[in-house]
Image (spheres, helix red, strand yellow):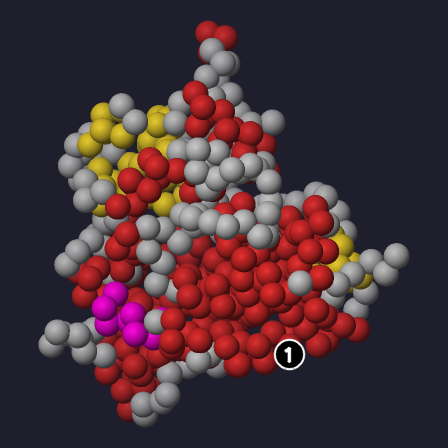
Amino acid sequence: MPCFAMANESPRPVYDPDHSGTRTDPFPLFERLRAEDPVHWSPALKSWVLTRYEDCRLALTSPSLSAERVRAFLARRSGDPADLATLRDQMDRWMVFRDPPDHTRLRGLVNRAFTPQAVAARAPAIASLVDELLAPLAERAEFDLIADFAEPLPAYVIMDMLGVPRADLRAVRRWSDELALFVGAARGTGEARYDRAEEGAKRLAEYFRRLVAERRARPADDLATAMLKAREAGEALDDEEVVATAVLLLFAGHETTTHLIGNGMLHMLGQRAPWRRLVADPTLAASAVEECLRFEGPIGAIGRVVAASIEIGGQPMREGERVFALLNAGNRDPAVFPEADRFDIGRNPNRHLTFGHGIHFCLGAPLARLEGEIALGRLARAFPDLAVVSRHTDWLDSLVLRGLLSLPVVRDRG
């Protein structure tokens, strides 16, 4: 069950992401928060928490709320400038943690690789990779849909784009998982997560510095070389910005799409009717992706820091306070989505917030959508008889990322 405050017999809901019931199924609590305390002060997070669609969208677009929150947070944590230096320097160069004009410059220099036209050109290669991953699974009665398919697919796609050899997947995945302990705001690992995230950031930075040096000496037809050559209004990325952006693209390019596929398949297979509908009509794959993103999307929350005093939902917020827009709560807001708790792969319109909103709208959204559409469509054709092995699910210990640790499935020929 979700965590509720008990002091003074108060029935007011309280958001604590560390509570096991909240991690397993946060949606009953989200429903109460939207109805009773939609702009909620979370004692556990020492932050504001938003659960209504319009409030979440405001938080993503208001100039009073800043994306530049990482450096200040790490600086408050330690007075030693050398402590977590790589983590601080890398995160400070990520465009998702920058406001204009830096955000505008960084995004403009990378954007051309992720236009709908550029992404569409990758469809044949993605389809070939999906078939390559599915082929050996056809010989097995049971497999883990996360480890055997949903993890390697987006990782290989973004690695191929960056020019990273597929043979290095295990190493870069391990370092990315360490980095996720900070970026995903994992809490159960305690203070040790900072040191582990620092080590992951250091290893990834070293890896991409070597790759950048190689591409400076021997350019190739890949995104790393393209970033080195990019020019926008007379400006270019310096080498450290290329390194940081490559780390960001690798991290964001596979973590979120893995969870898009995993979470979506959990609900389609668990409810059966949506899966049977997709099997009968694989052309619904694109629409199914949008509903997977809405119903239980891979980004549970996006954080901001108050840069200038603002009022949201009647609650005044002061400069320096943190705000979390709980996207999976906003995406179930019945004021915007009729029958919001029903998983409908044909839902239209579907104006979910999973990719963000405004200037920080996800750069990789076209790629994630394409990967998801091809993956779901081909899964439906190749494995119409899939079923989940167990209703028990283990979720990531993360406030920001929402995803399964595994999803065992079986061929149900009965």
The one of 344 and 231 positioned closer to us in this rendering: 344
Q: In the rendered image of this protein, does residue 222 appear above or below residue 324?
A: below
Q: Which residue is at 60% across, 27% downward?
A: 1
Q: Which residue is mark 1?
A: 132
Would you say the magenta stretch is mainly helix, strand or loop? helix
Q: Residue furthest front?
A: 348
Q: In the rendered image of this protein, does residue 226 appear above or below residue 380?
A: below
Residue 147 makes an appearance in the image: no
Horizontal and vertical percent position of residue 250: 42, 67
Q: Residue furthest bottom?
A: 218
Region rendered in magenta: 107-114
**Relative to 3, 242 lies left or right:** left
Horizontal and vertical percent position of residue 327: 42, 43
Amino acid at the residue labelled 1: Glu
The one of 313 and 238 positioned closer to us in this rendering: 313
Quadrant in which the C terminus appears: bottom right
Q: Which residue is at 48% across, 58% downward?
A: 256
